[in-house]
Image (spheres, rainbow, N blue to C red):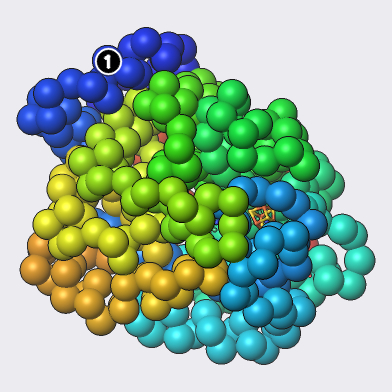
Amino acid sequence: MSEIRHNWTKEEILTIYNKPLMELLYEAASIHRLHHDPNTVQVSTLLSIKTGGCPEDCGYCPQAARYHTNVEGNDLMSVQQVKAQALRAKSSGSSRVCMGAAWRNVKDGEEFDQVLEMVRTINKLDMEVCCTLGMITENQAKRLAEAGLYAYNHNLDSSEDYYKEVISTRGFEDRLQTIDNVRKTNVTVCSGGIIGMGEAIEDRAGMLVALSTLNPQPESVPINALVAVEGTPLEDQKPISIWEMVRMVATTRIVIPETQVRLSAGRTEMSREGQALCFFAGANSIFAGDKLLTTPNPDVNEDMEMFKLLGLNPQKPFIKKMQPQTVEAANSQYQALGEKPKWSRPEHKIERNEVAKVKAKAVK
Ligand code: SAM
Ligand code: DTB
Ligand code: SF4
């Protein structure tokens, strides 16, 4: 196994990003094989459970109320609607459902209770459940954990410096605080960002410094290519080239070796050859389904054809290693219930949300 480092510098990361391409690919692919099965790719489905009308000013986002985009706002979905969509996602090969809400932060009350019920419902379908609901407190993170949440997505989005050019309504520090709140539970952390917002390569490296120096490092890192949406301040950004995506994926794989690197928004603009290079460079997760949250994504049948062509297999749910701190949080939940700690590293594979199951038993 290659060493996990939490002290990467911007200069070191820039040197990696700028290597001759063949060297970069060889290094990233070699590290990928030490930590992951190179023929397995996680397939997740996004579900926008509450769309549009968001009070924030994220310059890339079609769901911000202040920009005039074509997004039609919707109230929070019902649990039944979510269950039906999750079942569809499962039958088309997804092992994870990620529910997104256009909220600045979570407010305690009826709507949050409804989200907790959605988490419980998807958990019962033997799928990993992820949420991205904006900022959350430690207490809200604990309640999500108890409901059986597997992952929480909260992106850093860019470097600390460039972040200020794109978002003014909440700071980089607030994002780190939410990630910290999630880390106090057994929920895994999913955090990444966007490239193609006009940032310099130094900012991409800066974002990877911020992500790789988190201890533990996130269990998943989505790399999104900006989808430039009409009506948003970033509507005129030129699309990035595939080479930038390949370099970003490879560099992420090298500095955060155990994580699932997700080839996220922007795949409709990428050829199969381009995506194959990204998988070779260490991407091992995608969003499937013809819609991301509000923007288009490749058709799931086309993706499955691509998997067949490349000999890739969809990853089964609950098989990835947890970071040590997450294992500790899970075991302390067991102990609080008077049960023996069950999880250890590195050989333990995550079973389905055991803690939620034990809790349910304890309540009976
Ligand atoms: N409101 C919550 C938040 O901001 O944390 C959750 C939903 S938000 C849409 C989740 C992530 O989607 C953002 O952090 C951003 O990285 C990504 N995203 C949003 N719009 C995008 C776009 N136009 N292109 C690429 N990624 C985008
Ligand atoms: C992430 O990093 N990308 C996903 C997910 N996490 C929530 C969202 C992409 C959204 C792209 C724009 C849209 O469809 O609205
Ligand atoms: Fe709101 Fe999230 Fe969009 Fe920002 S990215 S405007 S917080 S939905």
Identify the residue shown where x is 27% and y is 39%: 244
Q: Is residue 45 shown above or below 64?
A: below
Closer to the camera in the image, 334 or 277? 277
Q: Is residue 267 shown above or below 77?
A: above
Q: Quadrant of residue 61?
A: bottom right
Identify the element where label 1 is drawn.
Answer: helix
* Other residues around mark 1 within 10 Å, as few (<14) / some (14–19) / many (≥20): few
* Residue 320 seen anywhere in this rendered image of the structure: no
Q: Is residue 283 left or right of residue 5?
A: left
Q: Quadrant of residue 114?
A: bottom right
Q: Quadrant of residue 94?
A: bottom left
> Which quadrant of the rendered structure holds the C terminus?
bottom right
Give residue 3's position: percent from left, percent from top. 32, 19
Identify the residue shown where x is 77% and y is 48%: 136
Identify the residue shown where x is 50% and y is 56%: 235
Residue sticking out furthest to the right: 109
Mark 1, residue position: 15
* Residue 196 seen anywhere in this rendered image of the structure: yes
Give residue 170's position: percent from left, percent from top. 76, 39
Give residue 113's position: percent from left, percent from top. 83, 69
Give residue 15's position: percent from left, percent from top. 27, 15
Q: Is residue 85 shown above or below 263?
A: below
Going by the numbered disc 1, the residue's amino acid type is: Thr
Identify the residue shown where x is 82% and y is 66%: 112
Q: Is residue 300 left or right of residue 225?
A: left
Residue sticking out furthest to the front: 236
